[in-house]
Amino acid sequence: MTTPISQKEQQQIHIIVDTMIEASEHTITFFNEGKVNDAIQAFSSVVEGFYAVTQLTNYYSIQFGSLIKEIEGNINDIATHVENQYIAKAKKDIKMLLIPNLNNWKNELSNTLLDSRLSNKTVNIGVYYDKHSPLKAFKEPRILSLVNAANKLGIDLYFFSSKDVDLINEKITAHIYSNSEWITELKDFPDAIYNIVPLHSSQQSRIERKLRRKIPFTSFPVGGKYQLIKTLVRNKRYANLLPPFHLITDELIIKSFFQNHTEAVIKPFAGRRGENIYFIRKSGERFRVTEHKKTKIMNKDSFYNWINETCLKNQKYIIQKYINATTTKNEPYDIRAHMQKNGEGQWQITKVYPRIGTNKTILSNISRGGRTEDLLTFFEKEYGDKSEELFKSVCELANNLTHYIDKLHHFSIEELGIDIALDQDLKFWIYEANQVPESRYHEGDRAQTILEYAQYIAINQIFHQNQYTDKSKLTNIFDSVSSKLPFKSTDDKISVGMLIPQNEVNELTVASAYVANYENVYFYYFTIKDIDYEEMKIRGYFYQNHEWVPKIVEYPDVIYDRLRGRGISNFKHVYDEFEGIPFTNELKGLSHDKVEVYDQITSAGLFNEHIIPYKKIERVKDIEHFMQDFNRVILKPTGGSFAIGVHYIEKKKNLDYIVIQGAEKKYYNKVTLTQYLRELLKKGQFVIQEYIETRTIDNNPMDVRVRMTKNSEGKWDFVTIFPRIGFHETVITPVEKGGYTTNLIPFLERNFKGDSKVLTNNIEELSLNLVKSIEAYFDYSLSDIGIDLALDQYSSIKIIELNVNKPGTFHNEFQTAQYVIPYAKFLALNK
């Protein structure tokens, strides 16, 4: 049947129907997991897809008889079941009726829209690497395996890089293996591209982005091994199978780790091939450090000197709980499951095998002298009659985990290497998931599977997207191509882009421009509306002659993030776009409340004498119970700043209460206070603390604000430390609201007994330990933090709160810029 429907529209129809089938299957999975909201969302995409396709086919008068009515009836029945909470009926109808009908519809579409299929011609697959020829990136065995697999499958295979692409004429200068030699030939664009290195959007060249719009790609990024593990932790489902670990940013992290463990593994943040991996065993004040087959015994001082020289000077390292996974001969081993999507787009285990080291090392890597063998045979020798059950469990875990990771990345992944450990209690652990796994002993199997998958997406013209690449829904964005603004070349100088909210050009922005000029760094600010995602350009505003001048500029080397929108859905595409570019702060914006931070510093066990008793409030009864122990308390929101919503509550002997908020003072009895608090708790989450009497000799409330950021060496430093004095009866008045500040040491000398310099040193030492502990807990790169401290009548230091979200810079903008810009420069030089 011939229709006027375009090739692109035909491709869209096939993609939508495939997605509908996939979403139907996931709807059942979500229902089985009890995730009803996720199931409804998945089913909604089925409904939307159905009406999108039928609208298009109706427009072109393409008829499918009674099948469309059957599918529409299935959808209506399932929706009714869900609405009435008949989940079992909904699952049955999806499995027995809807999915079979969708597959029949897909087949009819394939027969009707023949133009969108490539099954009647030889499929062309291009092996692509952006920076240079894949022939240089791959070793010869892998290249020849791809060539042999292509010949076996009847695929035309060629290799190319971005410099070989002619976008205008849609031609490729292709490198082809023919008659045992390499030749160069001009070819049309391929039907699908196997990109050997999946890159984040910010790392993709303009040519790669253009190709992705026209041609299906096999591979999409997952954020690297460390990012992938963090994703699993955040989504919790497999978090209990991940050995606890921390990114090492300071020796305090090591000390804190060894408070709970006597054994640990320290390894590079982005290591490969088992290099620079250290096994640490702590015994009293001595440390046994083993690297491969070499062991050293160190005392405490020598060990921490070694930590500073090895783990803090050069590449990033992590410390991880040691998992005792060894054979009966005390040989370390782990299990690698090489997962790939096949010629039907389904996951399969291409190879699963043990990697066994010698009993003279902690490493199981084959590249470091280890060996491999058949997994089932290995299990039979090690575990006897448990071998088949363990083999089945390994395959099941690898399959389930792979499907889950794929789901988290919009079903765009095509290959993973899952590393699994089995400890002495036969508990499974997940070491890591590697997107580009080794395959030296099964190159042929790997090559055939990846090309079968490439052929599958070529024939079906499946264009995947994931959170690192999808920009299809963006609107109202900058178009650098049509803009008449001048282009600003940054030459070889480091460029820092300050990402700000709309209309937040202030003293800090100007101060940053001045400091950047002094540091010989290009500086500009931009908002989310100034990004051209397609051309990878930004409308940056440069400070020239006391005014901000817009120019078109490349993506920066470092982003100074004042938007703090990471983790907020409206800004997700922005942070995904710049994945791979260092940010001054990686913490999820405005997402960490005071209680979370209190809980962390309490659990660290290092700050007990400084912690003010507190409790997160769930109901009014919690406040009543807390005030049985403390007559005077502070009740404040778990989020927010500027003292908004902060209440002082004091219980009098006659069961009356005084409540002070700002300048307003009111009296309540128990009944009226309960009513007031009940209404207050409806407005948000609150935390209650014991009230610490912290006053000047003039009886004004005060606290000490410590403002810290990282410096040009990537280490924490003090921007400023100053007392804040209020004029209300009990609660500090922020400077922004009329409070005032003064110099610390003269203030301490006037208001507190004892040596002011010693007290200042104590404040600095406590603050430095706090930020190191917080950074170790979050496992994110932080660059600035605000700490509020109280000083009681005995000059004891108490922790009021820590602001990790977006500390204010009021009255210290220039001091802040003097640290942040050199730190950004440090990030650029060390990325």
Image: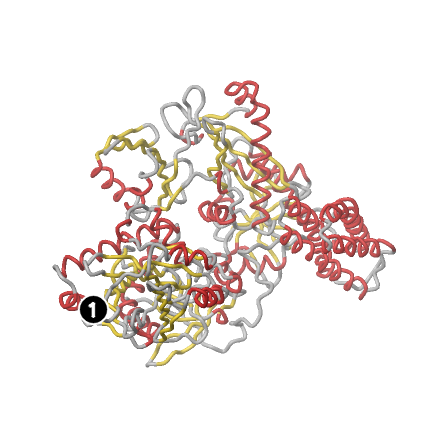
Q: Which x, y percent locates residue 727?
A: 27, 75
Left/right placement of residue 563 relative to residue 386 reads left
Rendered-image quadrant of the N terminus: bottom right
Q: Is residue 192 above or below residue 57?
A: above
Query: In this view of the protein, can residue 492 be seen by the observer?
Result: no
For badge 1, the amino acid type reads Thr
Label 1 belongs to which residue?
Answer: 696
Q: Is residue 65 left or right of residue 257?
A: right
The image shows residue 588, relative to residue 407, as above or below, that is below
Residue 250: % across, % down = 29, 48
Which residue occupies the foreground of this view, 540 or 752? 752
Q: Taking 283 as reference, is 198 above or below it?
A: below
Is 794 above or below relative to 176?
below
Residue farthest to the right?
65
Residue 259 falls in image quadrant: top left
Report the residue that reaches farthest toward the front: 654
Residue 614, by quadrant, is: bottom left
Tell me if 373 is positioned left or right of 823 in this view: right
* Quarter containing the C terminus: bottom left
Kindly state the secondary structure of the residue where label 1 is placed: loop
Residue 132, x across and y down, in percent: 48, 51
Residue shown at 62%/37% (left/top)?
Answer: 348
Neighbour tally class for label 1: few under 14, some 14-19, many 20 plus, Cα within 10 Å: some
Residue lying furthest left in this view?
Answer: 755
- The reply to whether residue 424 is visible in this rendering is yes
In the rendering, at what x and y percent does residue 786 appear? 32, 62
Number of marks in the rendered image: 1
